[in-house]
Structure formats: structure tokens, C-alpha cells
Amino acid sequence: MASAAADYSDEPLTPAGRLFVQPQMNQIIHCAVGFKNPINIDSIKSHLKSSLLLSHPRFSSLMVRDSQGLEHWRKIPHVDLDLDRHVIVVPNPVTTASHFDHDTAVNDYLADLSTSSELSAEKPMWEVHLLMAHNCAIFRIHHALGDGVSLMSLFLASCRGAEDEEKMPTLASGKRNRVNGEKGWWALLIGFVGTLWFSLIFVVEFTLRCLWVRDRKTEISGGDGVELWPRKLATARFRLQDMKLVKKAVPNATINDVLFGVISSGLSRYLDHRTTNALPEGLQITGIAMVNLREQPGLQELSDLMKSSSGSSWGNKFGMLLLPIYYHKSSGTDPLVYLKIAKVMIDRKKRSLEAHFSYKIGYFVMTYLGAKLAAWLNYRIVCNTNFTISNILGPQEEIVLGGNPITYLRVNSSSLPHALTMHMISYAERADMQILVAKDIIPDPAFLVKCFEEALLDMKEAAAAINRT
């Protein structure tokens, strides 16, 4: 990162942005975009030049440090942005195998990027890799520029609908539970007391996880230094229609509940396969989930994100939740049990202020106690848990970029001390989950993918049986 004297026009990084440029937590987001037709390099460059991406100040700013070591964004003139330094063309297949699967080749390329390649601070911190032989573009964007909601909203603002190229993609929006104003005062009081109680429990657990508490070691456990180990990447594919059918089998369940039930079931299946000695029934395996804290859930209109006074502003605005799953021997277990357990746990999390607490305490530590301590605390909580999970709502219909139809969207990030990270994004009634593993700990991610996909299919069968009765 370049050092420079302070400039009056420099803008300080937010505390969350500063966290992601610390060596221990240096994070780059990778978004793989598959295309139906061969990639036209000149068309991609022309589209980028006129796109909202380059007009966004974060994508035309250098990251510099002042004399006190504080990071700032320094805007550079648009004409000085050399697009050829950001567009990396890979003309040949990214595998040496004579017969290869395109998805596997792209995933291998992404796995290598997750541990081996940083973004230079001598230019704005983003790149686009064009894998010409695989009809795939990989957007590499430093996490300091924004979170998944910000970046996906910006990306979709540069796309158009496949059926009507004059139309912007439809943004999928989530739903935030609201308190029913018709409830009596006693119900509100009980709800308030419940929120305080669950918040206290989870805040204490969160604090202990930062310091020393960790789960029993299993075949999927990572730890200090594992972020440097080589990676493998595999893709689990789900149908949103299947998830919607499953969630109807449990009252008031959500897609996130189903996703976490699938992860619980899938990991139990995988551990059954990998573990030589039987694990104790109900063994806790704790993960980390990232939660959007904006006032409006889901993707946002870019104009709303760019309003600094908006409750849905641009940047990294998310909190962290500890999400425990519990091992159950897969044979003989009702598939929907995993969903029911996940829903109870997530409902309690929703009633707590844990995500807001993690965001506020991180902001406080970074602002007043320094970046090194904040990075150390975040690193410790990752070391003391077992996996990361995130879920981003994507476009509801098929879209095009620069006139070329998009066949898939997939997201992953740089490696962490976790041996297992999972990032899911939905696109046109499908959902792909990228599963990044430390291959010396989890050598068979394709089998893990099979465990997750079969878990959802078993839940679907159980839900269909309920609907028939």
C-alpha cells in the first residue's frame, strides 16, 4: 500500500473497510460470471468504460496511508485510469488436462486466486479476469470497497434483462419481521425481555469466542495459519423451487432456515463418512454468518446506496452471527428435523442484538483501540469457529451484460483460517453455493457437495409427503 502525504480531498476508510486491509483479515471478493456466448474483449472494455462501475468513486481511487499510518481513498482522474491494468485476459484454458470440465477448471482457477494473488495498491483495487476458453469473467474486488449487497447492487445496475434489454433487472428484496402494533402491552413487554435475554446470552458467547472458547476438533476444523494452506473449490447447485417447497413444510420457515438445515444435515452426513470413531450425538459445530444491517433488507437501488444519509448506504454494513449446528447421525433421522432445529436457533438470533453488537463493538475497537487489536479479535473468532456461510439474493430473472446472456453467477472470497467457507447466491430460480476448502483437511469437496445436494432432496421428499397427507 502506498504512503503519501495527506491530501485535503482524501477520504478516510471506514472502520470496517480498514479491517479488510489488515494482513490477518485481507479479503478479496471473487464473482464468477458465466456467459452463453464467446467473450468479446473490446465489447467488455467498452462496456466497462461507460458503466456505473468506473463512475463509482471507490473504483477510481487509490488506497494510500498518511504519515500516521491511517488508510485513505485518493481519487484519481477518470482519464488516468488505465483499463488495461485492470482487465486480465487469459486466452488459453486454465488447465493442462486434455479433457476438462469448464466448471471444474474455473473453480480450480478461483481456488488458486483465493490464496496466492493479492490486489496491488498501486492501482484501484479491482480486476476483471477474462477466461476466454471458458466463457467466464471473474470480478476480483477488494472487500474494503464494499460488501456483497453493495457490490451486487452495483453489478446489476450495469446489467439488463435478457427478455428486454432496455429494462433493469428486478431486484430481489428480503423481508424484515416487524412487531405487530396490535399486540397488548404484556406481549410487547415479554418480547422486550426476550430480546434482552437472548442478546445477553449471545453477546457473552460472542465475547468468549473472541478469547478462548472453541468447539471440539473434527475433520472439518481449521485454525491459526490455515488461511495459507492450498484450496479446492466445488459448486453445490440447488433449485429455489425445491427450497420453497421445503420451507412450506415448517410454519413460518424461510429460505435461510432451509439453507442452514441443509448445511446441518450435509455436514452430519459428511462427518459420518469421514469420522472413524463415532462422534457424540448432538455435538456442536459453530459457524459464522454475515448479516446485512441496512434498514431495507435484500438488494438496494444504487441511488439509495449512494446517499450517505441513507440507512441503506454504500460500504460494509453487516454484522456477524455465531450459528451453531448439531451433529446427528444421518441414518434414521427425519430430514426435516434439521430444518426445525435450525429455525428455532435462527429465530432466537433474530430476537437478539448480536449482529448489531458485533458491528458496534468492531467499530468501537477499530476507532478507539486500533486496527491491530480489531484484526486480532476478528482473526481469533474465526480461528475458534468452524465455517463461514453467506447468502446473497441475486437477480430474479435471467440477465445480460454487454449484450451477452449470463448463464451463472457464483461468489467466493479469499481464504480464512476456516477449512470450510460457503457462499451462496441465487440467480433466476437457481442457487449456486461455492464451497471453498483447505484441501489438506477436506480433500473431497465434491463429496461434500453431494452431501448438501442430497440433504435438500431428502427434505424435499419429506416435505412432499407432508403436503400429500
Image (cartoon, rainbow, N blue to C red):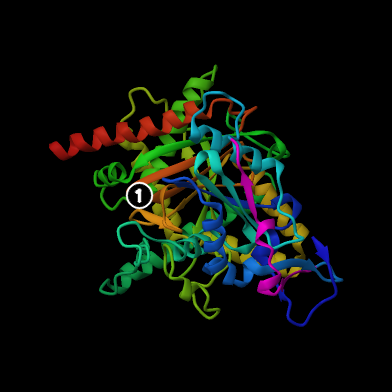
Q: Is residue 38 left or right of residue 238?
A: right
Query: At x 16% / y 40%, what residue is drawn?
Result: 467
Question: The N terminus appears in which quarter of the rendering?
Answer: bottom right
- SS of the residue under disc 1: helix
Farthest residue, direction bottom: 8
**What residue is at 55 percent from the left and 43 percent from the top?**
132
Q: Nearer the viewer, residue 339 or 348?
A: 339
Q: Is residue 262 above or below residue 305?
A: above
Nearest the camera: 66 or 169?
Answer: 169
The range drawn in magenta is: 70-92
Q: Is residue 86 above or below residue 423?
A: below
Classify 250 as above or below 1. Answer: above
Q: Is 115 on the left or on the right of 153, as rendered?
A: right
Q: Residues within 10 Å of mark 1 (few under 14, many from 20)?
A: some
Q: Is residue 327 visible?
A: no
Residue 463 visible somewhere in the drawing: yes
Residue type at mark 1 is: Ile
Q: Is residue 232 magenta?
A: no
Q: Quadrant for residue 144, please give it.
A: bottom right
- The residue carrying mark 1 is 255
The quadrant of the rendering that contains the C terminus is: top left
Residue 294 place in picture, x, y as percent: 48, 68
Q: Residue furthest top?
A: 276
Give how far across and how far down residue 265 sits, in percent: 41, 33
Q: Nearest the camera: 102 or 425?
A: 102
**How many marks on residues?**
1
Image coordinates of residue 333 in percent, x first then y, are 34, 28
Task: Please tell me whether residue 77 belongs to the stretch shown in magenta.
Answer: yes
- The image shows residue 360 at horizontal and vertical percentages of 60, 66
